Amino acid sequence: MKHMINFKNMDKEYLLDILDRAADIKKYPADYADCLKGKKMYMLFEKTSTRTALSFGLGMEELGGTYFNQAWRDSNFCVGEVRDEVRYVGRNVDLIMARLKENKTLVEMTTFSEVPVINGCCNMYHPSQALADMLTVKEIFGRYNIKMMYIGIKNNVLNSLAEILPLLGGQLYAMTPIVNEPSIDMELITKAKATGRYFELDPNMPYEEFKKLVNGMNVLYTDSWIDMEFFNAPEYAKTKAERIEKMMPFQINAELLRSSQAIVMHDMPIHAGYEISREIVENNIDFILRQAENRRHAEKGILHKMLIG
């Protein structure tokens, strides 16, 4: 039994198989309409969600399966022990998808679960998002060996991109003036650097030098500077202001893209006026929405692979 908490236990062939299945399912949905008939998925949400909830739920239904959606606060996961709750859940379903605040909770779930567990996002990794990103890259460019620059906070999204894009032959450049400490995984970063296709950029480089690097990219990728559950929290206001001040020079806007042919990707939710200007959002909205829609198709590839084999 294989879980998907990150990509550490998955080689290139395994991930390409998921992506190939996702592409085929997207192209020929009728051929897969009943492939998961009789299969059941439990979805558990401790973090807020739009795309993960909609895409995994609809994806399971489109493959003929069923799902049950539960909020962490409404479950006994928040009052009982994870090991007991997850073993009970596994007696009722074939697979668990959990979107949780802390990676350590997911790891505990995998230790005791009798069915596969998929990480729908945690503080350290976002594997389903990275697979959707790769599906989108392949659709647009016809290949994975592209140059992508991630501009934003060093976080869970960057971790999963650093795991998968260099492995598939692409180059990933990271401009991350701020590090989200709970997301640090030195093993992952060391492995990514060893590929020779992952590069961490100096935030203190001259802006013109930064722009020249941008001009050589196929894709610019950004993410929220503030964790979504804290964006409007009063107690987070000081940290939010500090992050905005430090990150604003790296906003993806018309000035940065003046001589660039790169497309822009964003995993959403978007905070226009912060990590990206509204003008650039609208100029790239078709790419961004395709990326978001591909969450559903990539996740169908994951479900098919993990439940069919």
Image: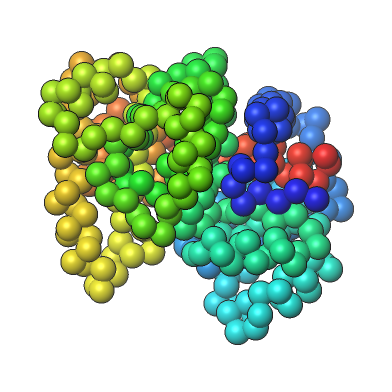
Instruction: Give the camera-side residue of 288 and 106.
Output: 106
Q: Is residue 78 left or right of residue 279?
A: right
Name the colouring of the figure: rainbow
Residue 41 lies in quadrant? bottom right
Vertical position of residue 104 compared to residue 59: above or below:
below
Residue 211 in the image, given as x and y percentages of width and height: 20, 23
Give the quadrant of the C terminus.
Answer: top right
Instruction: Give the camera-side residue of 24 and 146.
Output: 146
Vertical position of residue 185 compared to residue 106: above or below:
above
Residue 99 in the image, given as x and y percentages of width and height: 56, 59
Residue 13 lies in quadrant? top right
Task: Look at 28% across and 32% down and name the residue there.
Answer: 201
Vertical position of residue 302 compared to residue 182: above or below:
above
Task: Look at 70% across and 56% down and name the residue there.
Answer: 117
Q: Is residue 79 left or right of residue 304?
A: left
Q: Is residue 137 left or right of residue 148?
A: right
Number of marks in the rendered image: 0
Instruction: Give the camera-side residue of 170 and 186.
Output: 186
Residue 92 lies in quadrant? bottom right
Residue 260 in the image, given as x and y percentages of width and height: 25, 18
Task: Look at 75% across and 67% down and name the residue there.
Answer: 112
Q: Is residue 26 visible?
A: no
Task: Look at 32% across and 51% down and name the residue there.
Answer: 179
Furthest-right residue in this view: 38
Furthest-bottom residue in this view: 79
Residue 135 in the image, given as x and y percentages of width and height: 57, 29
